[in-house]
Image (spheres, grey):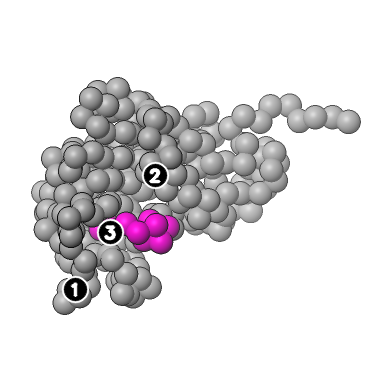
Amino acid sequence: MANGGGTGRAFRHNAGKMNQVVVVTGGASGTGLAVVERLLDDGWFVAVVDADSAALAEAEDLLSGEEAIFLAADVTDEDEVAEAFDTAVETFGLLTALVNCAGVRRETAFEETNAELFRQVLDINLVGSLIASQAALERMGESMGIVNLSSVSGLRATAGSAAYGAAKAGVKMMTETMALELAGRSVRVNCVAPGLIEPPATVFDEDMDHRRAWLEHTPQGRFPTHREVASAVAYLLSPEAGSVNGHTLVVDGGFSIAGLPRVD
């Protein structure tokens, strides 16, 4: 259910010019929070939507006084998403952007991946992006930019990522289909595909053997940061990316293109 944070604050309203209004799902922590912070710095009005009420409260404290509202909603629940997006529009005006950061990562060997886990991962990562995107389109202004968060695990096979990789590959293809179908409505849809993030975003990422294996196959020898991913999102929503549509911007230090390293 939507829960508007920061009630009682006065927000700047339209004054002859349409607000730049963005909804960021999964925006209360990790990469989503970095995206929220970057877009606020860029002058956006931000509606932060997240299913984690505790993380929302922390984000609201962190961003107190900013042009942001904080709304509790599960992206897999169409009614909750509709209520949250309605609150965003009532507060700031029609939407001009959406960033789908809400997601869950589960790493399990294929033969140990049961149907329930597979459905859960697809539902949150892929179906949730569909639901949020359709809700945003119903509440858009004259134009809209949408950025979906995929992953390098959706671009190339990674052991243990049957469910997560399939979901993120689906996000990439859905992005391209959306870009094709919606371009005539002044809607641009792009995708950002991060590699493993530094600092760790999940307990799984804290497996040092796993992290070392990633680093060994990353030409830059380091992981991208949440802020670097947020910068990629900000670029894709900016006027400078006005002709970028249906593109997947990879932020992984070169992991996804690494082949045989140079041997001197």
**Badge 1, how many Cα within 10 Å: few under 14, some, many 20+?**
few
Q: Quadrant of the N terminus?
A: bottom left
**Badge 3, how many Cα within 10 Å: few under 14, some, many 20+?**
many
Q: Secondary structure at mark 1?
A: loop
Q: Position of residue 218 (x, y in %)?
A: 66, 40
| Mark-to-mark CA distance, 2 and 3 | 14 Å
Mark earlier in primary sequence (1, 3)? 1
Is 116 a magenta residue?
no
Which amino acid type corresponds to the residue marked 2 in the rendered image? Ser
The answer to whether one can see residue 178 in this image is yes
The answer to whether one can see residue 125 in this image is no
Q: Secondary structure at mark 3?
A: strand
Q: Is residue 15 above or below residue 191?
A: below
Magenta range? 38-50
Task: From the image, tell me which residue sits under label 3.
Answer: 45
| Mark-to-mark CA distance, 1 and 3 | 13 Å
Task: From the image, tell me which residue sits under label 2.
Answer: 238
Is 46 a magenta residue?
yes
- Residue furthest out toward the front: 16
Mark earlier in primary sequence (2, 3)? 3
